[in-house]
Amino acid sequence: AGPVWIDTDMGFDDLAAILMVAASRPVAGLSLIAGNVVLPQVERNALAAAAEFGWDFPIHLGAAEPLSGRLETADYVLGSDGMPGRGRKLPLAEGNALPDATGAITRFIEGGGRDILAIGPLTNLARLAQSRPDLLTLPDLRLVWMGGSAGPGNHTAAAEFNAAVDPEAIAVLIEAGVRISMVGLDCCRQVQVTLDNVAPLRNQLSERAQLLADLLEGYVRIADDGRRPMALYDPVAAAAMVDPESVTFAHARLNAELNGTLTRGMTVIEWRARKAEPNALIATTADAPRIRALMQAALIHAAEG
Ligand code: BDR
Ligand code: CA
């Protein structure tokens, strides 16, 4: 299988998703987008992860703000650095990311790349659709996005976080005719992790395994300090990309609510093809044990590497 481009706002679940892709496919590069945390912190997290895990692919800076309005972050969930730790933290790294995310994704697609995993707000990809409408609409292009929901939201009652940050970006992509494979909140919530799932990493002796165990434990403890299971988000979209049997999709019409006072950022799914022509693939079911196993194997692989 070919290389994968990953567009990310680099919280902990993004890191797990990237490691899952890297375990089985070449990663062509990362483009960074503000979301979980502000762009300079997204950049620090990406460079720190690159140094820790020996990533040799390019990392490009994307948009610091959504297409319209002010950035809202998720630091109330993932903490001020996006990495909810229990002790060890990713060591800080020197340097800067490369510029021009949209130019980099353009070159990836022009060079034959067809698989894009988006695990943050869709601003960078919307900008690409605006500058080069011919690229993301190529018939064999696959854009798998963790975002939106076919049920309730998390950032607001109606809207999932990545959708809520930049609803206009979703609308731009839909308007441009880009077929999104949406892995929404309702699907991701079928895949949950508990403190038990930290044990296989904890049992590995290396310092890097302990770092990943601390990060995963911090993530699990977001849900009532680990007393409730925590859903995996970006890793479910990563699984859909690298292990298509782990997530099932159905054709439907995807719309983004831009105006509602209570519902801005809601993804409204019309399942009835007789009412509206399907324009997207919407994830409906996820194989939880399979995806948890995939993530654990990828984290252990990264700890050994
Ligand atoms: C999404 O929002 C972010 O906090 C996570 O990284 C994930 O991409 C879940 O709503
Ligand atoms: Ca994310």
Image: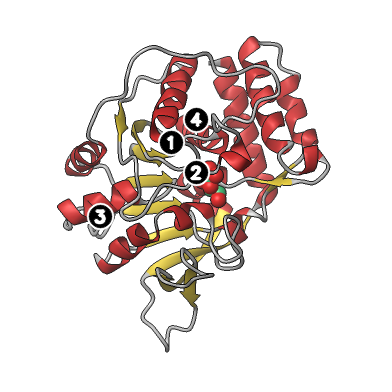
Q: Residue at x 52, y 35 (%)?
A: 11
Tell me the element at label 3.
loop
Tag 3 or tag 2, which sits nearer the N-term? 2
Q: Few, some or many C-alpha atoms within 10 Å of disc 2 (few <14, some 14-19, many ≥20)? A: many
Q: Marks 4/1: CA distance?
A: 28 Å
The quarter of the picture where residue 180 lies is: bottom left
Where, by quadrant of the figure, is residue 302 drawn? top right
Say left or right for 89 vs 98.
right
Tell me the SS state at disc 1: loop
Tell me, yes or no, if residue 243 can be seen here.
no
Q: Is residue 39 above or below residue 118?
A: above
Between disc 3 and disc 1, whose residue precedes? 1
Q: CA distance from mark 3 to mark 1?
A: 26 Å
* Sequence-earlier tag: 4 or 1: 4
Q: Disc 3 or disc 1, which is closer to the eye?
A: 1
Residue occupied by mark 2: 73
Q: Which mark is residue 38?
A: 1
